[in-house]
């Protein structure tokens, strides 16, 4: 409904007037009934888009339309939208379940990793080779001289994660570069990896948790599937009306 009304408002009020015309010159001289509550709500929403009431009145004047005429056009748009809505078939849970059963594999959740890292960039021109640095940090962690979190706070050059102990959060292979995924894929939860070079730079990874790939339960995705089927039903009804 909102999209339909917005298109009407753009047509009615989108063009600025070449000059301002007095608002009262375009008042409908005939007595008019008060707008229905739903029309008044939409009219009030429109008015709130303007910083000052005078600007709203100037726009109406520039379009040579009275508020009563605008209310009537809103009422017509609402009636048309209601008629379209009445032709949109309701999506029941049985239809949602059928779609779920036929498309479960498309909904598969990929493997997920929760990991942290200590990071040294490879793009520091004054330090073209940082392998010695990263290995020295790794030795401090493995010897117990520093905890992983302390090493991340002191040495990591990933500003987004260093204050979080290097925590990268949960991620999938779709969200991270392939060489980074290769570095964490075989680490067990709690395991500290050896220094590894990726396209971004040097890392020391520690995997916190992992989640294997799985198919979601129906209840997890029911709302999203319902929204998808409802959208498809609406498009099937609306497209013929948009020709």
Image (cartoon, rainbow, N blue to C red):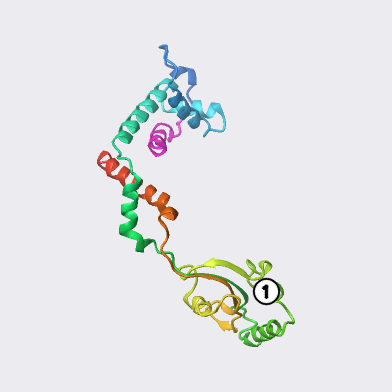
* The N terminus: image quadrant: top left
User: Where residue 211 sits in the image (x, y, percent)?
Assistant: 50, 69
Instruction: Looking at this view, name the residue that lies furthest to the bottom.
Output: 132
Q: Residue under circle 1?
A: 152
Q: Quadrant of residue 69?
A: top left
Q: Determine whether, in the image, residue 10 is placed left or right of residue 119.
A: left
> How many other residues sit within 10 Å of disc 1, few (<14), some (14-19) or many (≥20)?
many
Judged from the image, the secondary structure of the residue bearing numbered disc 1 is helix
Q: Is residue 99 above or below residue 186?
A: above
Q: Residue at x 35, y 60 (%)?
A: 104
User: Where residue 41 sits in the image (x, y, percent)?
Assistant: 47, 28
Instruction: Judge whether residue 19 can be spotted in this image.
Output: no
* The C terminus: image quadrant: top left
Q: Quadrant of residue 156?
A: bottom right
Q: Magenta stretch containing residue 64, yes or no? A: no
User: Where residue 133 sits in the image (x, y, percent)?
Assistant: 67, 85
Chain part drawn in magenta: 1-18
Instruction: Judge whether residue 39 can be spotted in this image.
Output: yes
Q: Residue at x 55, y 82 (%)?
A: 197
Q: Of helix, strand and loop, which mostly describes the magenta segment?
A: helix
Q: Determine whether, in the image, residue 216 is placed left or right of residue 206.
A: left
Residue closer to the observer: 208 or 170: 208
Q: Is residue 31 above or below residue 137?
A: above
Q: Residue at x 52, y 76 (%)?
A: 180
Residue closer to the observer: 168 or 11: 168
Q: Determine whether, in the image, residue 237 is placed left or right of residue 203.
A: left
Q: Magenta stretch containing residue 7, yes or no? A: yes
Residue closer to the observer: 154 or 207: 207
Q: Is residue 236 above or below residue 202?
A: above
């Amino acid at each position: 409904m909102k999209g339909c009304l917005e298109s009407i408002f753009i047509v009615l009020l989108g063009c600025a007037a070449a000059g301002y015309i007095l608002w009262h010159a375009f008042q409908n001289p005939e007595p008019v009934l008060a707008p229905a509550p739903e029309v008044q709500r939409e009219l009030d929403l429109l008015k709130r888009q303007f910083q000052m009431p005078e600007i709203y009145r100037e726009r109406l004047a520039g379009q040579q339309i009275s508020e009563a005429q605008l209310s009537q056009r809103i009422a017509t748009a609402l009636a048309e939208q209601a008629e379209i809505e009445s032709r949109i078939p309701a999506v029941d849970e049985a239809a949602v379940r059928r779609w779920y059963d036929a498309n479960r594999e498309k909904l598969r959740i990929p493997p997920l990793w929760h990991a942290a890292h200590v990071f040294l960039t490879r793009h520091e021109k004054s330090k073209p080779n940082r392998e010695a640095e990263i290995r020295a940090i790794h030795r401090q962690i493995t010897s117990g001289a520093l905890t992983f979190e302390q090493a991340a706070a002191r040495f990591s050059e990933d500003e987004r994660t260093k204050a979080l102990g290097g925590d990268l959060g949960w991620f999938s292979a779709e969200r991270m570069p392939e060489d980074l995924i290769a570095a964490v894929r075989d680490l067990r939860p709690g395991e500290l990896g050896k220094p590894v070079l990726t396209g971004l730079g040097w890392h020391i990874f520690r995997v916190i948790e992992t989640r294997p790939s799985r198919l979601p339960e129906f209840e997890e995705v029911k709302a999203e599937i319902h929204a998808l089927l409802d959208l498809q039903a609406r498009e099937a009804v609306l497209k013929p009306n948009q020709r």
